[in-house]
Amino acid sequence: MTEGTSTVGEMALYTVHGENGRPPSLASAAAQLGAALEDLDAAFGVVPVDLQAGLYAVQARPDRVKVTAEGDRPYQGPFSSPTIVPLAPPRKTSEDD
């Protein structure tokens, strides 16, 4: 198994915080969630949500995360992570001809 990649179980979104204007590493995100690195989805990575607030999203196995609602950092999760796909193929434009 690749470092930071989980192939077992469903994933959910969680928010984590960066420091000093920089995103957290996967290891730091795992530590913030009380999870092991292998319980995070490395392919999803660390995605910016609100850069001014230093808020980022990661996918993790909800059965392995140990976050609580306590503390001064909101929006920890879990949040659903539905697959988003286009409803139809892209339309051809005159530029595509």
Image (cartoon, rainbow, N blue to C red):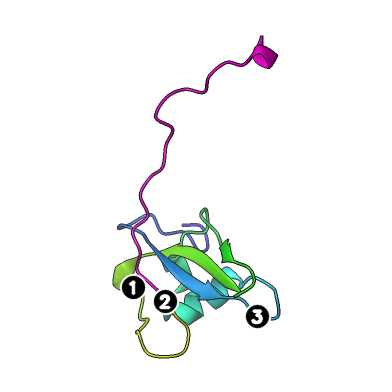
Q: Decide which of tag 3 and tag 2 comes sooner along the chain.
A: 3
Asked whether the beta carbons under mark 3 and mark 2 sit within 8 Å of each other, the answer is no
Q: Which residue is mark 3?
A: 19
Type of residue at label 3? Glu
Please give the name of the residue rendered at 39% of the width and 29% of the height, measured from the top-left corner. Answer: 87
Asked whether the beta carbons under mark 1 and mark 2 sit within 8 Å of each other, the answer is yes
Query: Which of the image's four quarters has the C terminus?
Result: top right
Q: Which residue is mark 2?
A: 35
**Residue 45 lies in quadrant:** bottom right
Does 95 sit left or right of 73 as displayed?
Answer: right
Q: Which residue is mark 1?
A: 64
Return the x and y of residue 92 as percentages of the image width and height. 57, 15
Q: Which residues are magenta?
A: 75-97
Please give the name of the residue rendered at 46% of the width and 57% of the height, measured from the top-left corner. Answer: 1
Return the x and y of residue 38 as percentages of the image width and height. 45, 66
> In the figure, 27 relative to 4: above or below?
below
Mark 3 to mark 2 CA distance (whole Å): 19 Å
Please give the name of the residue rendered at 35% of the width and 49% of the height, measured from the top-left corner. Answer: 82
Q: Is residue 96 magenta?
A: yes
Question: Magenta segment, principal secondary structure?
Answer: loop
